[in-house]
Image (cartoon, rainbow, N blue to C red):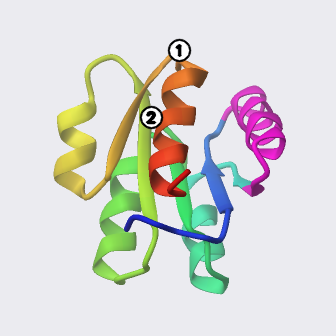
Amino acid sequence: MRGITERRILIADDKEIIRNLLLDFLSSYGCEAGSAKNGAEALEMLKGGPSSLLITDLDMPAMDGIELIRNVRNLAIPVTIIGMSLGDKESEFLKAGADYFLSKPFNFRYLKSILNFVFRE
């Protein structure tokens, strides 16, 4: 999913500090961002309205990031997905259907390069 013009982003992470950090960054980047504190909440939000990008953590209660990605792909919800986690979990995220991986602690320049590619800037 490249060349997206809408900038609606959903962040799924159980840690409020990470959600707020990403919300602030994405807002300064000109994105409309929302957040969910677990995968189940994020899935309901995605079913309820379109987002162009999902950024999801791995370890969350109710539904982890891998399960969230699998559900999103099984439901054919059209969204670009960035998986993020501590450690080397990139292959797990990509096998589940993520488009990109962001290692924690994340580098905002790398995140911005992903956003530039996704939003074609």
Q: Is residue 47 left or right of residue 16?
A: left
Q: Earlier in the sequence, mark 1 or mark 2?
A: 2
Question: What's under tag 2, amino acid-wise?
Answer: Met
Q: Is residue 24 above or below residue 64?
A: above
Q: Residue at x 34, y 44 (%)?
A: 100
Quarter of the image holding residue 81? bottom left
Q: Secondary structure at mark 2?
A: strand
Residue 90 at x, y percent in the picture: 25, 33
Q: Position of residue 39 (x, y in %)?
A: 53, 56
User: How much space separates mark 1 and mark 2, taking CA atoms?
Assistant: 9 Å
The segment highlighted magenta reads 15-34
42 or 63: which is nearer to us? Answer: 42
Q: Check the image and report above or below for 25 versus 117.
A: above
Q: Main secondary structure of the magenta part?
A: helix
**Magenta residue check for 32:** yes
Q: Which residue is mark 2?
A: 84
Q: 10 Å neighbourhood of mark 1: few (<14), some, or many (≥20)?
A: few
Residue 35 in the figure: left or right of residue 65? right
Image location of residue 53, percent across then percent down: 54, 60
Image point (40%, 64%), residue name: 2
Q: Amino acid at mark 1?
A: Pro
Image disc number at residue 105: 1
- Image quadrant where residue 45 sits: bottom right
- Name which residue lies at 29% across and 78% down: 74
